[in-house]
Every structure is written in structure tokens, then in C-alpha cells.
Image (cartoon, rainbow, N blue to C red):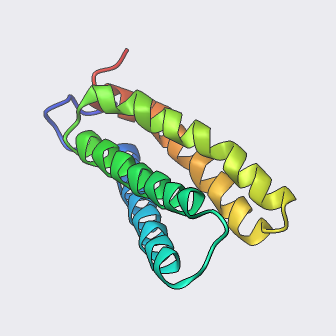
Amino acid sequence: MTEPAGGVRPVTLTVAVVLLGAEAVAGAGVAVFFVYLDLVRRTGNAGAAIGETVVFALLAAFLAVCARALAGRRRWARNPAVFSQLALLPVGYYMITGGLPYLGIPLLALNVAVIALLVAPATRAALEIN
């Protein structure tokens, strides 16, 4: 039986929050690396390079907000968190088919795991979602 909303946070929700937080940190790290590359390399399209940097920074911030809100048991954060994981599935697929399976396979596994944790009955009960 799952705990009520005021009780102990279930393991499924805790692990989902940790994984989302780790994704946010990784996204922020990529954004910082892209800032470095934007500053030191010459590129044919500076706008595209800056755009990639901004996208990763926004993704990291979005995942961090979702993780923080889920840690506080805000039910509204579950759907955006699931959506973000669904949106990252094609990225993992194209990493695999593009010659980066060592990055794509773990990304796909992480995305599927987070989705499973967020739709688990214990998580839904903790967030008071029927």
C-alpha cells in the first residue's frame, strides 16, 4: 500500500527526481561546454551555435524546475517531466543511428526509466493523481 500525500515520499518518486536532477546537471554541463566552444572556435554560423547553447540551457532549467516541483509533490510537474522524456527519445534514437550508440542507448534507457517511475502507482498516489 502506498503512503498518503503527507507521508514519506515513495522510492519511485525519489529516484525520478534524482534522475531528472542529474539530467538537468548534464544539460547545464553541455550548455557550459557549448559556451566555451562558442568563445574559442570559429564557426560558419554563429547564430546556430548560440542557438544550440540556449536550447541546452533552457532544457537544463526546465528539467531542474520539474525535478524541484516533483520533489515538492507538485502534481502539475509530472506531465511536463514525462513530455520532456518523450521528446528526448528521438534524440537517443538518432544518436544510435548516427554513430553514437554509447550515448544514445543510455539516454534511451534513462528516458524510459524516468517515464516508468513517473507513471508508477506509488508516484501517482504520492502526487494524488488518479
Residue farthest to the left?
6
Query: In the figure, residue 19 lies in which quadrant?
Result: bottom left
Q: Is residue 8 left or right of residue 12?
A: left
- 121 above or below 8? above
Residue 11 in view of the camera: no
Q: Is residue 40 left or right of residue 71?
A: right
Number of marks in the image?
0
- 39 above or below 103? below
Q: Position of residue 12 (x, y in %)?
A: 40, 45
Residue farthest to the bottom?
40
Query: In the figure, residue 3 lies in which quadrant?
Result: top left
Q: Residue at x 67, y 44 (%)?
A: 89
Relative depth, front residue between 80 and 30: 30
**Quadrant of the image for the C terminus?**
top left
Q: Position of residue 84 (x, y in %)?
A: 50, 40
Q: Residue at x 86, y 57 (%)?
A: 97
Q: Position of residue 118 (x, y in %)?
A: 45, 37
- 124 above or below 59? above
Q: Is residue 91 left or right of residue 78?
A: right
Residue farthest to the top?
130
Q: Residue at x 58, y 48 (%)?
A: 111
- 129 above or below 82? above
**Quadrant of the image for the N terminus?**
top left
Relative depth, front residue between 42 and 74: 42
Q: Residue at x 28, y 40 (%)?
A: 70
Relative depth, front residue between 21 and 18: 21
Q: Is residue 76 left or right of residue 48?
A: left
Residue 53 in view of the camera: yes
Q: Position of residue 112 (x, y in %)?
A: 61, 45
